[in-house]
Image (cartoon, rainbow, N blue to C red):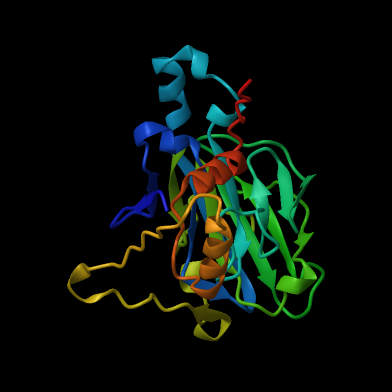
């Protein structure tokens, strides 16, 4: 929701006004991989956390640091890798994320590092059905198995990040060359890809916004939960949604006495 993609160059920029840069942003490719062996990269192009620390040193904290997750997800999964069972990947703390759990898998990586994900969906081979992390062209993790419930489904390259602007590279050439040959996502065979078509935009650019009017303590959010389940095309904007988003982003919850 708070990502502004550039028209060229594969740059993803978060909205930074009012501290939004401290909340996780997410982006997913429209092309999902369902076969073959392909590679893509991401790199923190600008570390926005440095600017925050320089402007106010008291803001220094874990939730203020730049953070990157790189992986794949199914088309209807959360854009925040690890927040549901529909995604799998690695994060800049060196953790492998699968089924909502994090396990140590590699060393930490930071701004400036070219981070690559190799997804192997070949039917046979010692590393079939796995994904691997590469940092600056060198292998950084062992091949990690794609969870069973995700196998057989199109898996879309996905990135989640905060306190940073991100450069994503789908090809045709890697930013950090690998010690072996591997096609990048941009060069994927048509038979290996399933594309999610963009929803048709409303005529004249007019979008629909609903403002529910409910009595206090009369089941407002129960109704909202039902409505969103029945109408997944809508996005909730509310105090509880912002609080949930902040907690998922690692922002500490302030206790009110």
Residue extending farthest bottom: 191
Residue extending farthest right: 126
Quadrant position of residue 35: bottom right
Is residue 139 or residue 248 the one in the foreground?
248
Is residue 170 or residue 77 the one in the foreground?
77
Would you say residue 46 is visible in this rendering?
no
- Residue 214: x percent and y percent? 45, 57
Q: Please say if 237 is above or below 50.
A: below
User: In the figure, is residue 107 to the left or right of 204?
Assistant: right
Residue extending farthest left: 204
Seen at 77% across and 58% down, the residue is 143
Is residue 103 or residue 10 the one in the foreground?
103
User: In the figure, is residue 194 to the left or right of 128?
Assistant: left
- Residue 97: x percent and y percent? 72, 52
Is residue 160 or residue 189 the one in the foreground?
160
Quadrant position of residue 105: top right
- Residue 69: x percent and y percent? 60, 48
Q: Please say if 241 is above or below 253.
A: below
Seen at 53% across and 46% down, the residue is 240
- Residue 2: x percent and y percent? 40, 48
How many numbered discs? 0
Seen at 50% across and 84% down, the residue is 190
């Amino acid at each position: 929701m708070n990502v502004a993609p550039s028209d060229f160059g594969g740059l993803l920029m978060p909205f930074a006004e009012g501290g939004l840069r401290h909340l996780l942003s997410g982006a997913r490719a429209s092309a999902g991989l369902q076969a073959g062996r392909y590679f893509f990269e991401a790199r923190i192009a600008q570390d926005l956390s440095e600017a925050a620390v320089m402007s106010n040193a008291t803001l220094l904290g874990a939730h203020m640091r730049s953070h990157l997750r790189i992986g794949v997800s199914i088309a209807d999964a959360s854009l925040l890798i690890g927040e549901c069972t529909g995604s799998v990947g690695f994060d800049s703390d060196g953790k492998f994320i699968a089924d909502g759990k994090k396990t140590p898998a590699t060393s930490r990586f930071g701004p400036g590092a070219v981070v690559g994900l190799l997804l192997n969906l070949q039917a046979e081979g010692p590393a079939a059905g796995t994904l691997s992390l590469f940092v600056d062209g060198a292998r950084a993790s062992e091949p990690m198995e794609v969870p069973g419930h995700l196998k057989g489904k199109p898996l879309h390259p996905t990135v989640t990040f905060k306190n940073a602007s991100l450069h994503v590279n789908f090809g045709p050439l890697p930013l950090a060359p690998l010690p072996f040959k591997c096609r990048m996502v941009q060069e994927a065979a048509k038979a290996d890809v399933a594309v999610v078509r963009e929803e048709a935009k409303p005529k004249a650019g007019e979008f629909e916004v609903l403002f529910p009017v409910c009595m206090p303590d009369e089941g407002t959010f129960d109704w909202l939960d039902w409505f969103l389940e029945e109408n997944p095309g809508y996005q909730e904007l509310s105090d509880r949604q912002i609080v949930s988003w902040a907690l998922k982003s690692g922002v500490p919850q302030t206790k009110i006495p």
